[in-house]
Amino acid sequence: MRAFKRLSEISALKHLSADLQRATNREIMRAGKNTTGGENMALYRLTVNREKISDKRLTYIHGAEDIYKEFREEQESYDREHFTALYLDNSLGVLGIETLSIGSIDRAAVYPRDTIKSALLMQATSIVLMHNHPSGNRQPSAEDCSLTRIIMFAALTMQIKVVDHIIFAGDAYYSFAENGKISEYEQDYIQA
């Protein structure tokens, strides 16, 4: 019964998301005055994310190297892990960007449900995950691999694809897609 209730909430989010994508930011904030606290926060986050991405030069994703070049300077400036998601449409056009967690020097607490909720609110069909390693080690940790896998499984359940997870480490980066991890996790999902 509880799972059914969660599924109907997600379905309602998808319908709300379609209406919000057509609305202007002013209309979204006006609508927020008639909502509960949680709904109002979701509306506010959507508005902020839509405005934030309009300032970015990167509007379409062509690969990990493009993302690395665009966000390298920002990611290198952090002294703690910052875990961020790029939300994309069918054409890999950037719909929004969100910092999901700011952690410590060697980890960040990320909740898959928040990642998926934001993707649904933005009507994203794909996600690119990215975070920095202040240590300069570009290799993914066991926790990085596990989190990527968990988010991928949750996203695929909602028909959202995780295109890549990029780790920024100084003058280098690690791409889960370029290293075959995304394909491997997709196969694991299909076989499960």
Image (spheres, rainbow, N blue to C red):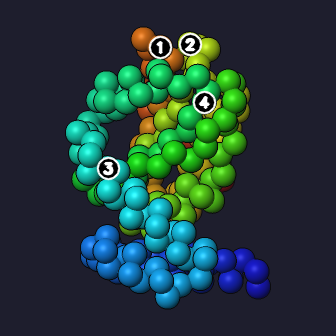
* Residue underneath mark 4: 81
Q: What element carries label 3?
A: helix
Residue at far bottom of view: 34
- For the residue marked with disc 3, what is the amino acid? Ile
Q: Residue 136 carries which label?
A: 2
Q: Residue at x 53, y 32 (%)?
A: 131
Q: Residues within 10 Å of mark 4 (few under 14, many from 20)?
A: many
Q: What residue type is labelled 1?
A: Gly
Say if mark 3 contacts mark 2, CB within 8 Å.
no
Residue 139 can be seen, yes or no: no
**Which label belongs to residue 170?**
1
Residues at marks 2 and 1 touching, judged by CB atoms closer than 8 Å: yes
In this view of the protein, which residue sits in the foreground, 170 or 126? Answer: 170
Marks 4 and 1 in Cβ contact (< 8 Å): no
Report, in whole angstroms, how far the alpha carbon at label 4 lies from the one at label 2. 11 Å
Viewer-proximal residue among 142 and 54: 54
Q: Which amino acid does label 2 sit on?
A: Gly
Residue 41 is situated, as x and y percent measured from the top left of the image, at: 54, 69
Alpha carbon distance from label 3 to label 2: 27 Å
On the image, the x and y values in percent for residue 88 come to 35, 53
Which is nearer the N-term, disc 3 or disc 2? 3
Residue 98 visible in the shown view: yes
* Rendered location of residue 126, percent (x, y): 40, 53
**Crowding near the residue tagged with mark 3, few <14, some 14–19, many ≥20 C-alpha atoms within 10 Å:** some
Q: What element carries label 1?
A: loop
Mark toward the start of the polypeptide (2 vs 1): 2
- Compared across the picture, whether 111 is left or right of 35 comes to right
